[in-house]
Image: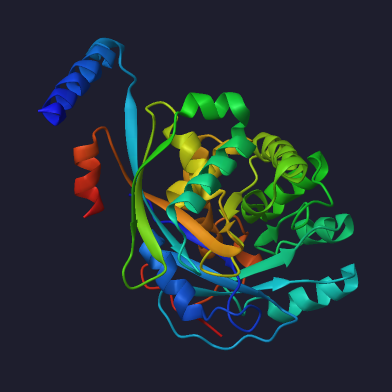
Amino acid sequence: MCKIQNRFLFSIFYFAVLIPPSLRDRRRYLVFEWISERVIDKWTLLSEIRDSIFSLYGDVGASESKIRLIEYANAEDTDGGMGILRCAHDKVEEVRAALACIHSANEARLSIRVIGISGTIKGATRLLR
Amino acid sequence: MSKFFDLNVHAYPETEVPAEELLRAAKRYGYTGIAITNHDDTEGSELKSNFCFSGIEIRANSVENLKRRIKLYHGKVAVLAVHGGNDKINRAALEDHRVDVLAHPSGEKRGGALNHVLAKLAAKNGVAIEFNLNAIINSRKGERARVLLKMRSHLKLVRKYKAPMILTSNACSIYDLRAPREMIALASLFGMEREEATSALSDFPQGILEKRWKKENDVVVLKNVNLESPRKSV
């Protein structure tokens, strides 16, 4: 009973926070893949991406690009993988340049390439497969 | 869709990565061809592939030495590049119509610089000015700011005198290669327009391989270089 109530409360909270569609941020989902010398975990990868954006565009630019790591999937056979990164819809090229500037993580060489861009998570997941 | 070329890649005898691996990675990234330009002081091994062009990057310490080596390699390779960085070497390379590419005129990091005279010479002799994107990727903070500043000023000169320009990765391993779209995004960091960057990756390299900016009697045309099915000559 308590659990159901909690979920109910959560859903009310959730809908209260949602802003109207016309005011929501426009986003793009970048599907990217990386190759690396060693396996790189999610937090290392994310901090490396953040560092690259901070060092290239500074704090203001980083706040404008609104990046967030949505999905992270390590490849089974190689030391690479794929992921989905969210960013603001007008900062795609900037984020792409920042991703291209990453050359290593934890002293393992690393190279990131954007495979595709989508406006929805659903479309991006389709590209991921 | 344009054909993309990366005309400055270093492979096995000079670096640890075998050429085949680089070719595979470049093909996956969507390149039509790459030119393996090892420095001439490391002896190269032959590679038979219809994806890869032969090239050489001459690293000379004096102008006489440079001239002698240009004479030696002229007509034997598809891409004859000169390792720039020193003002005297830059000038000598741009004055010579047998040279195809002046690689990183401001050094691998920073060093010499181009000026209006050199840019004019480059346009006249058909020597392409290379923008080495590896310097942007591998440097940070003040170092990178200086590299970008140099590239910005070079771009201004190249635009003014309409000299050929190319974007290259200068890759020494598969982790240094970047896909064409990434290269275009990196080029936008120093003010290159998207169309310019696309032609610097596809149109200009193609022109270099065809020797488009050379006068006909100056050039020993390589018989084996055919853009549809490039083959290693020599």
Does A56 sit above or below residue B121? Answer: above
Residue A70's x, y, as percent? 34, 41
Q: How is the image coloured?
A: rainbow
User: Looking at the image, how many numbered discs can be counted on the residues?
Assistant: 0
Rendered residue at 53%/45% (across/down): A47
Q: Is residue B194 visible?
A: no
Residue B203's x, y, as percent? 47, 51
Image quadrant where residue B12 sits: bottom right
Rendered residue at 52%/25% (across/down): A63
Does B93 sit above or below residue B159? Answer: below
Q: Nearer the viewer, residue B150 or B25?
A: B25
Q: Nearer the viewer, residue A92 or A70?
A: A70
| Residue furthest front as drawn | A1
Image quadrant where residue A121 sits: top left
Q: Is residue B196 visible?
A: yes
Rendered residue at 81%/41% (across/down): B115
Tell me: B96 left or right of B61: left
Q: Nearer the viewer, residue B108 or B83?
A: B108
Rendered residue at 54%/48% (across/down): A48
- Quarter of the rendering occupied by the C terminus of chain B: bottom right
Residue B167's x, y, as percent? 57, 52
Tell me: A62 left or right of A22: right
Image quadrant where residue B81 sits: bottom right
Does B96 sit above or below residue A20? Answer: below
Residue A51's x, y, as percent? 59, 42
Q: Nearer the viewer, residue B99 or A12?
A: A12
